[in-house]
Image: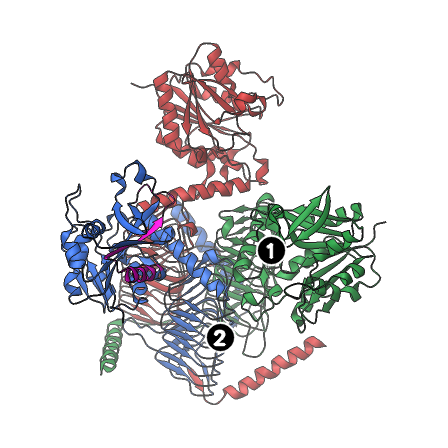
Chain colours: A blue, B green, C red
Amino acid sequence: MKAPLAVVVLAAGAGTRMKSALPKVLHPLAGWPMVRHVIENAKRLKPARIVGVVAPGADAVAGAFAPHPTVVQKQALGTAHAARAALPALKGHRGPVLVVFADAPLVTAASLKKLVDACRRARAAVGVLGFTASDPTPYGRLIVKDGKLERIVESRDCDAEQRKVTFCNSGVMCIDGAQIERLLGAIRNNNVKKEFYLTDAVAIARATGRAAIAVAGDEAEFQGVNSRAELAVAEKVMQGRLRAQALADGVLMTDPETVWLAADTRFAADVSIGPCVRFGPGVSIGEGSEIKAFCDVEGVRIGRGVLVGPFARIRPGSVVADKVHIGNFVELKATRMARGAKANHLAYLGDSDIGAASNIGAGTIAVNYDGYGKWRTVVGPDAFVGSNSSLIAPVTIGRGANVTAGSVITEDVPVGAIAFGRARQVTKKGRATALRAKLKDRAAEAKRAKKR
Amino acid sequence: MKAPLAVVVLAAGAGTRMKSALPKVLHPLAGWPMVRHVIENAKRLKPARIVGVVAPGADAVAGAFAPHPTVVQKQALGTAHAARAALPALKGHRGPVLVVFADAPLVTAASLKKLVDACRRARAAVGVLGFTASDPTPYGRLIVKDGKLERIVESRDCDAEQRKVTFCNSGVMCIDGAQIERLLGAIRNNNVKKEFYLTDAVAIARATGRAAIAVAGDEAEFQGVNSRAELAVAEKVMQGRLRAQALADGVLMTDPETVWLAADTRFAADVSIGPCVRFGPGVSIGEGSEIKAFCDVEGVRIGRGVLVGPFARIRPGSVVADKVHIGNFVELKATRMARGAKANHLAYLGDSDIGAASNIGAGTIAVNYDGYGKWRTVVGPDAFVGSNSSLIAPVTIGRGANVTAGSVITEDVPVGAIAFGRARQVTKKGRATALRAKLKDRAAEAKRAKKR
Amino acid sequence: MKAPLAVVVLAAGAGTRMKSALPKVLHPLAGWPMVRHVIENAKRLKPARIVGVVAPGADAVAGAFAPHPTVVQKQALGTAHAARAALPALKGHRGPVLVVFADAPLVTAASLKKLVDACRRARAAVGVLGFTASDPTPYGRLIVKDGKLERIVESRDCDAEQRKVTFCNSGVMCIDGAQIERLLGAIRNNNVKKEFYLTDAVAIARATGRAAIAVAGDEAEFQGVNSRAELAVAEKVMQGRLRAQALADGVLMTDPETVWLAADTRFAADVSIGPCVRFGPGVSIGEGSEIKAFCDVEGVRIGRGVLVGPFARIRPGSVVADKVHIGNFVELKATRMARGAKANHLAYLGDSDIGAASNIGAGTIAVNYDGYGKWRTVVGPDAFVGSNSSLIAPVTIGRGANVTAGSVITEDVPVGAIAFGRARQVTKKGRATALRAKLKDRAAEAKRAKKR
């Protein structure tokens, strides 16, 4: 049996270049905090433990790791110092320890697995994930000889020969758990910045006759995020991956570059998506459904053969069954729409249950908030709610009932009843001319008053 | 006089890589089914006949060809087999036969014409549309000697010399109608896939001393569509062409890359289009009109000096005259707006006629649907419909009439009348505090109940 | 003390390739007329005078220069002829005269300053802003020898040696004010087009023993705008600059390429902007505020911790205080929202003042227009306006008052009062079946009538 894996996620970086009060690793990427991508990737390797290393007071970052434990790096004294902070949480662990960075969310689980597997096979003390850089200038070079990693040379320390090396250090490292305490303990901070660098573990391992290896990943994976501009680039790369996967799964997108997906968006086949659609987290969409242009969709399970949009917004906590239609300028919030229900125009349905095959007229508002509490509106199946109605929650419209257009509904409507809540029309013949003359005078007077 | 042209459109491909229940060639491209682009391009050559070759049971595809006839290819046994299926429909035809592919919608009419013209001039038995490939690896090579096409060598059959050839086969072919039956009949399926390849026609023609030629088109035209990703690429290319044409015609676009056009969108000069505007099929827009950001416009003739959006949606069957204003969160469906009419905010006008210079207030709904039928709302010229009104169709508001805000209008309003359909205000002084206390208590109680 | 600077902006070009009734230099770029970018850049150099040269009758262009004077170039006889038209307006000016082009809005103030400074240092009679062209073919070449500009050779006049020169003329020129009259006067139109070219000033200066220099800028700055397509490219370049600056300032953008900024958009740190957001001119946004996807925002000062959108539109003349929420399908026009006020769904607030912590319900309309005048709606602090209400302006809702949902409010509501303006609900049990049968019959009859 293989010795179990542990993953240490370094998440204590300051991120001052983000110019933000929010810790860097909590900035959003494809609908998740950046660090969550790193944690979820780690989880795909089925490690026995995941340990986060966070900065002092970074409770929100620690929260993002839950239920995985975190340790606090009390001072920012370098990557080896950060990894060292995790040692107490690794007590008793003997298998490989993978060290990854919370601000490098594009590294794939496949690359991580490749590194760990290679380390196991080679019984390496240290393994490093490297990449061939199009421009190696800023990176540490991986000096490999006879298939073994000899050492990592920082960019500024390269001689002419080393400067030509294009195989570079990504930072991601896998260290033998039986040796990690010794290796980290041997790292010194005798450098310009007085920091403890994890990269030194390679030379230390080699100096004591241990094996070190390097495994190659793709350069695009190792783009770190240190600024808003880099975050925007990472978002673009991540979106590119998610879109390609959706297309391969049989989703139609008129313009994939204007569809923004969350990391967890799920599509069945033959889903169509128009241009300019944003998916927040927690969305799944059934076969043959169509999300038209200009929609904002988050936290909803959408069935089969559903039409949404254009200009629809679905907010979290909603469930939309098969054959439902949700039209333009319609907002759903924490609302269930049963099979075949329709709300096609200018409506707000909040905290509502809309029954099967019911029709919600244009301009209908489920009045869910009274200034203090939020209340539910329940519309039974096969009901017809006329346009411009206000349903004052808590209220129930019975099965097969009709609410006439323009009604304010304050009391429950029984099954099969008609409810009116509107005034009768009064028409005053020939009176518009006089009214208009009056309004015109008033406007003219106001204009004069303004000038005075 | 020139012998007439026939065009055979091969549209029987399975398209399994699309992962869709919809036949591949019906997938949308710039608002049309893909195959329609190919048919429309063929029509520009003014052929005597167009024949579609479709798969068994593909009635929807056959429907896309109407009124042009289609024949069924009973089994998928290769391109020559497909073309052969069209022979009965070409009975008596003696001029050139152009064979094109329904899943290659980017080939331009200009390139097709160039091929046919060259074949006529050269009295060629077979002509092939070729292109210089940036990477020829996957393509058949066109071996040309002394201006004549010698043969087409499939990629896998190339020798070292042929592999260097970058002039490649697009698949589009023009065959002399007098010889097509003989040529297709001579093609054999003695190959790995046991298919009949149209490309063999070249060698067969040459073997019998007939002329074959190749004509060059642009590589970008010959991108076929076999997957959702390739469809997205084709859409991008097509949009690029349409946008460039619109810009050249004098249209202002803030960001052309976020304007999605249909193949038949028509603009006069000095039209302005904001970012994020989608045009469905059937739109024409008159001089000096402006479509602001975030609009979805389909099936409407828009006049001159019209303002639309932002956030407006116009649905098919609408006609918008000069100087009309359609503002934010407004939906038009099968609605005519006469000169100078305005609907500036949050309104639904369905199945309506709005008279010249009339003003439709914010939040107005034309209540066109009662659960069973759709009815028309007619608003005369110079009428004023107050905000938040519900016009219960069928209903007519006369010329110069006023509907007061918040009214439900169930009966016709005569010319020049004022109509009220709302309750009179009742104010209860000092009562809000008690009401709020009650609502607050109710909310608190609900919260407690939830916890229990 | 330095001699003062004058800037001449050539803005008389016809722009026929734009195919527009609007003068070319007034076409919008990042929310400003193109020429305004050039004027604002000129102003950063703190010149003593700015003079615009405009075409006859181009009053709108002259208006864009105000309060700076303009002169009219009566005929389009070349750049030197245009510059000469400005001479009367430069009467008495002795310092450098910078000549820039209104249709080259991407030239940066930094490049202009570099040219002027270099001319001052070198006591040059003429200085030219040049650039290294990736493809120099269409441009005049700058022939520099020993650090001095010898002359400018038009592309068509280049010999083999000159054709290899990649250092090209941008058109931007700085001329010594003491010599400008003489230099421009010496330029002749003995060329194919019979035009007076400003570039000839170099050779004329050198011929009389004066110094001429060339200063290098970046090629991307010198993209002129002569067509809609070039305008779209210029917009993209300008947006790229503005977005990069915003990211550097600490703004989060999910997809910067779908955020359209105006030249004067101002952000505090930690502002978040979703995809598909358009900013018109005159927007500033305070710290920690979020503009969600699909918003159109113009002419508004937004405070701190504000939430806007998705699908919100804010129009000019609005002020939004800290902690305000503006939700989906909400339009604000010339409206102030005080601290913590909320309008979360489907509302139109025009010409309104909404008090602190007040809540505006879904579907509320401030009815500001009666067909003749625009009137204000004032809602006091801590008020609660129920959903689907119509507030008929001019009207005041007092502090702490409640307006019940669905009310039409025509009279002021006192502090702490409750106002109703809606009918009481009437429920008719068991009557929906009969109503539906009737509606069904009516629909069927209409269908039959249609067929007849």
Instruction: Give the residue number, with chain letter if any, for mark 1.
Output: B156
The chain containing the residue under callout 1 comes to: B
User: What's the amino acid at mark 2?
Assistant: Arg
Q: Is residue A360 visible?
A: no
Give the x, y percent position of residue B337.
58, 60
User: What's the amino acid at mark 1?
Assistant: Arg
Compute the Cα span from label 1 to label 2.
44 Å
Compared with B314, A415 (above or below) is: below
Give the x, y percent position of residue B125.
78, 52
Please tell me if label 1 and label 2 are on a single chain: no
Give the x, y percent position of residue C365.
41, 63
Q: Label 1 neighbourhood size at 10 Å, few (<14), some (14-19), many (20+)?
A: few
Q: Label 2 neighbourhood size at 10 Å, few (<14), some (14-19), many (20+)?
A: many
- Quadrant where the C terminus of chain C lies? bottom right
- Which mark is on residue C139? none
Instruction: Give the residue number, with chain letter if any, for mark 2.
Output: A304
Give the x, y percent position of residue C48.
36, 24
Magenta range is A111-139
Residue placed most toward the observer, A223 or B332 = A223
